[in-house]
Image (tube, grey):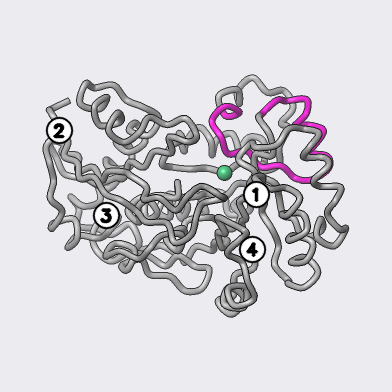
Amino acid sequence: MKFWFAKYELQPVVPFNGTQAKPRHGALLQVEWPDGIGYADCHPWPEFGDEPIDSQLKLLKRAKLTPLTEQSIWLAKRDADLRSENKSAFEKFSPLKNHYLITDIEIIGETLLKHIQSQKFQTLKIKVGRQPEKEVEWLNALGARWPFQFRLDFNSQLDYLSFEGFIKKLTVETQRKIEFVEDPFPFSVDTWLESNNLLRLAIDKEEGNAALDSLTEVPFSVMMIKPATQDVDRMSTFCRRKNLKFAVTSNLDHPLGQAHAAWVAGELKRRLPTQILDCGVLSHVAFEPNPFSEQIKSDGPFFVGVEGTGVGFDDLLDRVDWKELKTL
Ligand code: MG
């Protein structure tokens, strides 16, 4: 296996839940096997414990895989297999429905909400947990006036008691509109079981996933599957066995990563059609447009595809200035 990389920056349109709108760093990977070349993204979130991009690349050079680069290689191999057959990942793809991602409640105003509604999105995924008082007030106002359903993602920023307090302050009307709550506080079976009786919980972060196999009772109702960071077969098998709903999401990463996530989601939708919920792969709206994001075809909440072979973007990938990483 040979590796090339090309680092990139993505510029958030607005701050992500209170953090400054600083550029985010990742790298595209070009991976060569004897029988073909494939592409994937590597987009770490050091704020949530990932190695930064330079460490990811250094480790990869020394043949040490992280959860991210392990998935990048898996995704690149899928891409290489299709490219060598000159086929597109989106040939038999049926449009995939998604939520609308709101990374910071501060940006929400009448104009944006009207735009989201006119685009026929039904679900808003909202990053919350940084300023609970304000968020409760805002959610109640939103719940009273708009027909959206909500997915609240706390990124484990609360604890059990503050989460209970948060939910109790929501009006019944707003509570009814909550489809699920993602990672309200750090994973623990007992407190999650209790909260899951209050509102449907969704698990996203790896700390809970690590313990999946030892669970006798599943303390959540929904699983978020991120092909960029998680073993898709293991996660989807668990969902199938336990009859859990799931949503596939991007890693809020490069459009190439989004396309990979959409492709995986499309396959899972065919295999587990009654368990898949609206997904979260239309995340490029969180960043300033770039030539890659401009090639993503969407229609309102639907991800439609990308032109080209494999995961697409052929012309752009040809023009990338690749640097070789030592042979693995
Ligand atoms: Mg999450």
Mark whose residue sits in front, 3 or 1: 1
Q: Amino acid at mark 3?
A: Gly
Residue tagged 1 = 128
Q: Is residue 233 left or right of residue 311?
A: right
Whether residue 208 is visible to the viewer of this picture, yes or no, is yes
Which quadrant: the C terminus? top left
Residue ID for mark 3: 310
Image position of 246 (left or right of 61): right
Which span of residues is magenta-colored? 187-209
What residue is disc 2 on? 325
In this view, the residue farthest toward the front is 20
Residue placed at 32% from the left, 53% from the top? 256
Q: Residues within 10 Å of mark 4 (few under 14, many from 20)?
A: many
Q: Earlier in the sequence, mark 2 or mark 3?
A: 3
Residue on which the image places disc 4: 123
**In terms of sequence position, does the residue under pointer 4 or pointer 2 come before the other?**
4
